[in-house]
Image (spheres, rainbow, N blue to C red):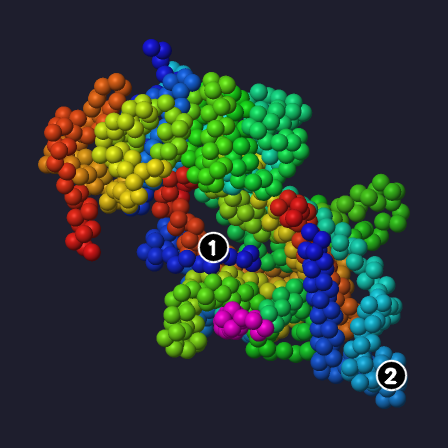
Amino acid sequence: MASAPPSIRVPASSVRQRLRSDSRFWIGLSTLGIIILIALFARFLAPYDPNAQLDISSLHSQAPSLAHPMGTDTFSRDVLSRLIYGAQISLTISLAAVAIAMTFGTLVGAVAGYLGGVIDAILMRLVDAASSIPTLLLLIVVIALWDEIGVVFLTLLIAGVAWFTVSRLVRAETLAVRDADFIVAARALGMPSWRILARHVLPNVVGPAIVAATLAIGNVILLEAGLSYLGIGVRPPTASWGSIIQEGAERVSDLWWLTLFPGLAILVTVFACNALGDALRDALDPRQLLASLGDETVQHTR
Amino acid sequence: MRRYLAARLLQALGVVVFVTTLSFVVVHLAPGDPISAALQNPNVTEEVRQQWRASYGLDKPIAEQYVLWLSNVARGKLGFSITHRRPVGDVLAMALPRTLLLCGLALLLSFVIGIGIGLLQAERPHGPRDRWLGRVLLVLYSVPDFWLALLALLLFAYRFPLFPPGGMTDPVTYPYLSNGEQFVDRVKHLVLPVVTLALLSSAGVARFQRAALLAVLPSDWMRTAIAKGLSWRTAVRRHAFRNALLPTITLFGLSLPVFASGAIFIEKVFTWPGMGLLTVNAIAARDYPLVTAGVLVMSVIVVTGALLADIAVAAADPRIRLS
Amino acid sequence: MTSPLLELDNLHTFFYTDTGVARAVDGVSFHVGAGETVGVVGESGCGKSVTALSILRLIRAPGRVEQGSAIRFEGKDLLGLSEREMQRIRGNRIAMVFQEPMTALNPVFTVGDQIAEVARIHANMSKKDAAVKAVEMLRLVGIPAPEQRATEYPHQLSGGMRQRVVIAMALVMNPALVIADEPTTALDVTIQAQILELLADLTKRLGTSILLITHDLGVVAENCSRVIVMYAGEVVEEAATVDLFARAHHPYTEGLLGAMPRVGGTAERLATIPGTVPPPTNWPDGCRFRERCMYAWERCATEHPPLYQIGGGHTSRCHLAVEPERRAHPHTPIAAAIGASAA
């Protein structure tokens, strides 16, 4: 992530205005909302039990039909139901991982930025070095060496590689604010450090952090799907979008529905996250704000 | 400039050492040891296991093992592959060029496409062309790599058999083809993986290039360019573009890691015998030496890529070059 | 009298922003003759820069030059030209020198390249010929070792030298008019003098007209034959330089002159004009200078003063032109009174 200048607070009204007029915001928000709802009410929406092998002799590997709109897999399980429950898994993992990464990253970043000095140097060197390792590789190696890892550990691992960017972001923000006059005044008045961080630094961080989190959710979904496709993420028989694709990968030319539908599900979800994240980012960008204040020199639309 | 180079080199070296250490730590933290997994067979007596361990130096204290590991790596001895029964170095030496070929071509293509699209978008920011291209890019950006690869395979290798469904060369006929035909065969096998990989990455490049251009469009010197009589389009293509190219050069170097790991999926789907496929298969076979060495090599590629990128930018930006 | 080189006729340039319509230039008319150096003076926000940008049609959304405005150059209305035709005029017949030499030049191209670019666009010169021309121009603006300098990048040059480069760029095609927007504001005082001298010398030799925009009356005194004073988007006074300094009419001009530090003057505090410029989205009714004026009376609140002729090419937008006896009764300006009571 490119280093961003310290954020200028943008008046809430103009942020809301710009979001409202941005189609990406609405598309992203509504799509994501629908998918979350699907995940929440999976039990009521799925026509079959995702793990039920309906009739292994006659109903396996069926192309889409009225009874099974997305076909059945090689174990005669209904793909649509597995897809719906897959939403649960994928969303849970990504939301949890991102939440953990955000929390941890914010803490580290704030501490490093505020305390500065040796602690800051050490922490940031570590972050720099760790984030230069390709994440996928790291995950593959770690997961491969520990044979069976549950969903919980998977989530923690993913969070473990995702928090670097957040910490950098928060650190930059903290540094920008730390030496501001009002902070010095607060300290002179005896305000404890954690309070200063909470009341003055965090509000500035919230905007970019939300953007980063939204985009991260999309990335994590892609990551988890990839790992599951390789067979080392969510393992069968649990249905995750990636694992469904993995099961059908051997016979992709025949059982095309096992590849197409889960992939579309991933695409739509990640697209929603990215659209939403982009819209939020543009709305919070102070440069857009300055442009709308109408300075006299040559400028461009919007 | 020289001081800058020296500092960066040192930093890169530090990261490589760090990664080497990390590989070591991870392997030794794993349950069991690297050898016992390979020797699961109950017929193997404990004596033999001890012998194996001794020959791999696993009976020595961990600190000594670490030093040994470091010195081995420095000398280029990366261990012995269990599945291939050859030194890891040899195995990697065969696979690495193939990955570099795939990734190199895809990288170039993705940048040509990405820079072009970014430029087209920035000429009229927020205009209709910009918006539409932006939407297409957003979709591309959100597509899972392995899925796009599978779709490409499905459509262009099976449904419409235009290209071969995988591999590097035709397994049956290749040895009997003339030189020209061999070249064509190789090209045909390259098309799908390269184009798929390139398309996926071009979205990111385009977004980046567009942002870089948009950042410089309000500059004073853009206004000067127009005041000199340049058309808006020429001013963007000549002045803004040249300026916004600098960050893109950095991106080029930083893209290498994405390719090194992103290629894993592409290589698996198209059965391209490169580093990615090698690593994935090694994982399945629990060939730990190969896995960790593979990771190490790829990390070195990453670090080198970033270093080269920084050097390239420093050379291209007259403000740094001449300081 | 031959028709003037440049004639602004009732120029209106508005900016359509979220907070309202900013009438940055609100009915400005003046002319520049061939070979003349005309100064436009005013404080920040008076619309002088926007006027300059409007002439070259460099105003972009949300700004717009309004219908009913006319900018005639060598007889043709620039506002009626197509963008392509306008491109042939920019840098060629009318050139502009901007305020910030630091940022006016592209940092990734050599100085020589940027000057040569003008020759290549307008005179269709080959790369080689244009490069030679660039060196020639650098020599013209007094840069030593021009062959060497042409291969250097902007960041390697000092501020003064960069501004010379910008001037060189402007003069490549020997334009009829050079618009200089605060060309020396960002420079050291000593360099300022050099640059202005350079401009004056070159234009005398080449016969170029200059429209010199500045907030500094001292600059105007030295270099311009005629002065236009702008305030709140309007021309409030116009006169030959000598006349303006000897017999300033508009109270705003008086205030500006009073605020000028003068060598040899009595060591008193500099007079300031109380109050600030009103916002361009909301110009007050009547005279726009009313609240800061020490002569204002009831008429000034209700009647927007036209540009009265004072004689000898001297105009002033002030009712004092028809009621000169009011000048005998100065009082505290409203703005100062508000300020005082608030204190």
Does residue C228 belong to the magenta stretch?
A: no
Q: Quadrant of residue A247?
A: bottom right
What residue is drawn where x is 50% and y is 46%? B215
What residue is drawn where x is 77% and y is 68%? B293
Residue type beneath disc 2: Ala
Image coords of residue A21 (percent x, y)? 37, 50
C129 relative to C24, above or below: above
Image coords of residue A302 (percent x, y)? 40, 44
The residue at the far top in this view is C1
Image coords of residue B233 (percent x, y)? 52, 33
Q: Nearer the viewer, residue A162 or A224?
A: A162
Q: Nearer the viewer, residue C147 or C120?
A: C147
Per the image, the residue denoted by label 1 is: A278
Residue type beneath disc 1: Asp
C9 relative to A220, above or below: above
What residue is drawn where x is 89% and y is 84%? B51
What label sits on residue B54 in the rendered view? 2
Tags 1 and 2 in contact by the CB under 8 Å rule? no
Disc 1: host chain: A
Q: Is residue B195 left or right of residue C105?
A: right
The residue at the far left in this view is C298
Q: Which stretch is magenta?
A: A98-120
Secondary element at image label 1: helix
Q: Is residue A20 visible?
A: no
What residue is drawn where x is 81% and y is 81%? B64
Magenta span main SS: helix
Q: Nearer the viewer, residue B122 or B193?
A: B122
B171 relative to C118, above or below: below
Q: Is residue B42 left or right of residue C278?
A: right
What label sits on residue B309 in the rendered view? none
Image coords of residue C241 (percent x, y)? 33, 25
